[in-house]
Image (cartoon, rainbow, N blue to C red):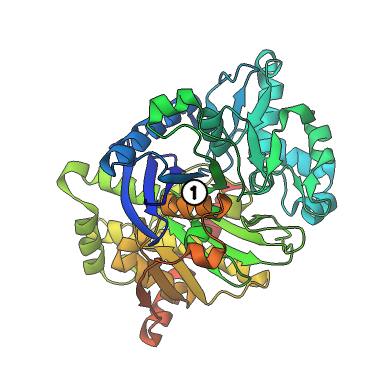
C-alpha cells in the first residue's frame, strides 16, 4: 500500500494541493484553484481583505481534485500539512462562524496602531523580547477591530491565522503554533510564551488565543463533515502547519543556521535561519520562530519581505494587454533591453506599507522615462530590476545584522523563471542561487510526514528533493548591476525625501 501525504498551500492568489509519495519523496499530482487569481477586497485605500469561506471553498475543490486524480484508497493518506499566507487575522464566534472578512498580510490599516504600541510598550522590550516592533502585524490588526468594531469584537471566541482556520474546518479543533503566534507578534522570545504585555496593551483577551502546538505534531483529525466535502478520508491527521515563508524555507530544506531561502511571487522574500534571536534595531526585517524550533535547540527565521514584487510584474503584463503577451515573452523583451533598462528605474512599492521602509507607503514610481527612447522592453526590464533592487535593499540590512548570505535556495517558479531576474539577483547580491523542484504545497506535505511520524527525521523527509540548476555570479556583471542598484537607491532616497 502506498503512503501518501497531502500538502495544502493557502496563498492570497490561490489554494494549491499536492500529493506526495512518502516512500519516494516525489510529488504525484498538484493542482491550484481557482484558475484565475482570488479576489482581494479593498473597501478603503490601503485595506486588503479576503473571505475565509472562499479559501475553504478552494481547499475543498483542490483536495477533491488530487484525491480523485491519484485514486487515493482507504488507509493510504497518512497526514495533512497546511502552509498559509502569513499575518492574516481570522475571527470566529463560539459556533466557529466567521465574524468578518480576514484582514490579510498586505492590509495597511493598523500601521499607526503598531507604531503607537512600539512606544507605549517600549522599544527596548519590543526589540529584545518580541524581536520586532508590533508594526502592522496580526496583533495590531486585532486591536483595530477592537477599536473600530466593538460590537463584533464582543462576539469573538477565538482569533486565528489563516492556516489555523483551514485546520479548524478540517478537524473542528481550534489550535495555533509558536511560529504562527510569533508572526502575529504575540510571542515573547525570552519567556518562550505568549506576551502578556502585548495582550494587556492591546486589551486582547488571553482566552481568544488558541491552544499552542508545535509545527510538527498531531493537531486533530479530519471529521466526517470535512471528509464528505473534501474527499479526504475521515480520521486522517493534520500534522503540520506553518506560515508561507517559514514553510517555503522548510520546503527547500533550509533548517540550519546560515541557510537561506527566497521567493518572488506576489511578494518577494529572503528568509535566513539562525540559532540566536537576532533583530534589526529599526525592525525593517523581522525575526520569527522557525518550524523546527524547540526550547532545547532554538531555531529562528529572519524574514525580509517586499510586498511589491510579482504583483508589479503582473501589473506590467496587464498594462501591456494580458491576453496578448505571456510571461516568457515579457522575459525575452526584458532581456533585449540590456542591463540598466536604458536608464529607466522602477520603484516597486505599490502594494501597501513596506516593512523594509519602516512601514512607509510610497507607492510605485517610474523614473527617468524618455518618450523618444524607451518602449515596452525597457519598462519590462526596469520592473524586474526594480524588484531585485528592493530585495537587495533588504538583503543588505540582513548582512548588517550579521547573517552570512552566500548561497540562496529557491523553487524554480514565479519570478525565478526569468533569466533577467535571476541574473540581476545573483549579481546585485553576489550570491550563488540554487533552484529546486519544489513548492509550498510539497513542503507542507513533507512537514506532515514528520508530524505524523511517517519520517523519522528531517533528513529522511527530504529524500527526492531535486536540485535543478545552480547559478554563480560572473565578475563581468557585478559592476554594471551595482550601478543599477546605486541609481535605484538614489531614486528611492529622493522619493522618500519628497514624502516627508
436 displayed left or right of 499: left
- Please say whether residue 279 is visible from this viewpoint: yes
Q: Residue at x 37, y 52 (%)?
A: 2
Q: Residue at x 82, y 54 (%)?
A: 190
Q: Residue at x 26, y 47 (%)?
A: 317
Mark 1, residue position: 307
Indicate the quadrant where residue 171 lies.
top right
Indicate the quadrant where residue 322 lies.
top left
- Viewer-proximal residue among 350 and 404: 404
Q: Which SS class for mark 1?
A: loop
496 displayed left or right of 80: right
How many marks do you count on the picture?
Answer: 1
Query: Where residue 391 appears, x then y in whole percent?
Result: 49, 62
In the rendered view, would you say 338 is above or below 287?
Answer: below
484 displayed left or right of 379: right
In the rendered view, would you say 101 is above or below 439?
Answer: above
Q: Furthest residue to the top?
A: 151
Amino acid at each position: 500500500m502506498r503512503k501518501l501525504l497531502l500538502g495544502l498551500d493557502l496563498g492570497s492568489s490561490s489554494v494549491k494541493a499536492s500529493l506526495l509519495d512518502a516512500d519516494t519523496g516525489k510529488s504525484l499530482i498538484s493542482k491550484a484553484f481557482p484558475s484565475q487569481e482570488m479576489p482581494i477586497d479593498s473597501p478603503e485605500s490601503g485595506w486588503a481583505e479576503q473571505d475565509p469561506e472562499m479559501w475553504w471553498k478552494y481547499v475543498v475543490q483542490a483536495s477533491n481534485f488530487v484525491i480523485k486524480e491519484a485514486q487515493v484508497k482507504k488507509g493510504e493518506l497518512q497526514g495533512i500539512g497546511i502552509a498559509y499566507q502569513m499575518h492574516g487575522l481570522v475571527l470566529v464566534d463560539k459556533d466557529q462562524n466567521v465574524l468578518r472578512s480576514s484582514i490579510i498580510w498586505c492590509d495597511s490599516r493598523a500601521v499607526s496602531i503598531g507604531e503607537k504600541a512600539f512606544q507605549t510598550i517600549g522599544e527596548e522590550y519590543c526589540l529584545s523580547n518580541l524581536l520586532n516592533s508590533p508594526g502592522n502585524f496580526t496583533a495590531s490588526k486585532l486591536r483595530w477591530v477592537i477599536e473600530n468594531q466593538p460590537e463584533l469584537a464582543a462576539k469573538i471566541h477565538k482569533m486565528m491565522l489563516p492556516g489555523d482556520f483551514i485546520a479548524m474546518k478540517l478537524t473542528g479543533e481550534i489550535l495555533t503554533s509558536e511560529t504562527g503566534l510569533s508572526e502575529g507578534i504575540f510571542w515573547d522570545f525570552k519567556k518562550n510564551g505568549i506576551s502578556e504585555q502585548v495582550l494587556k496593551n492591546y486589551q486582547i483577551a488571553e482566552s481568544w488565543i488558541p491552544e499552542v502546538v508545535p509545527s510538527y505534531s498531531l493537531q486533530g483529525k479530519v471529521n466526517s463533515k470535512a471528509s464528505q466535502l473534501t474527499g479526504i478520508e475521515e480520521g486522517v491527521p493534520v500534522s503540520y502547519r506553518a506560515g508561507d515563508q517559514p514553510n517555503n524555507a522548510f520546503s527547500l530544506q533550509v533548517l540550519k543556521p546560515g541557510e537561506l531561502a527566497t521567493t518572488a511571487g506576489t511578494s518577494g522574500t529572503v528568509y535566513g535561519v539562525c540559532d540566536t534571536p537576532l533583530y534589526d534595531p529599526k525592525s525593517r526585517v523581522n525575526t520569527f520562530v522557525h518550524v523546527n524550533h524547540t526550547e532545547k535547540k532554538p531555531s529562528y527565521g529572519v524574514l525580509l519581505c517586499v510586498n511589491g514584487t510579482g504583483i508589479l510584474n503582473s501589473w506590467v503584463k496587464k498594462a501591456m494587454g494580458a491576453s496578448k503577451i505571456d510571461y516568457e515573452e515579457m522575459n525575452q523583451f526584458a532581456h533585449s533591453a540590456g542591463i540598466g533598462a536604458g536608464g529607466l528605474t522602477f520603484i516597486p512599492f505599490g502594494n501597501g506599507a513596506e516593512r523594509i521602509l519602516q512601514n512607509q507607503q510610497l507607492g510605485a514610481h517610474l523614473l527617468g522615462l524618455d518618450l523618444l527612447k524607451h518602449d515596452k522592453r525597457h519598462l519590462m526590464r526596469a520592473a524586474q530590476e526594480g524588484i531585485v533592487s528592493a530585495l537587495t535593499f533588504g538583503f543588505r540590512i540582513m548582512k548588517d545584522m550579521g547573517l552570512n548570505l552566500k548561497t540562496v535556495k529557491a523553487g524554480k517558479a514565479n519570478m525565478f523563471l526569468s533569466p533577467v531576474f535571476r541574473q540581476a539577483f545573483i549579481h546585485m547580491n553576489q550570491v550563488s542561487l540554487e533552484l529546486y523542484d519544489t513548492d509550498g504545497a510539497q513542503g507542507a506535505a513533507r512537514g506532515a510526514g514528520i508530524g505524523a511520524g511517517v519520517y523519522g527525521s528531517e533528513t529522511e523527509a527530504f529524500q527526492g528533493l531535486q536540485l535543478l540548476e545552480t547559478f554563480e555570479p560572473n565578475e563581468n556583471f557585478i559592476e554594471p548591476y551595482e550601478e543599477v542598484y546605486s541609481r535605484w537607491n538614489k531614486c528611492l532616497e529622493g522619493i522618500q525625501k519628497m514624502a516627508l
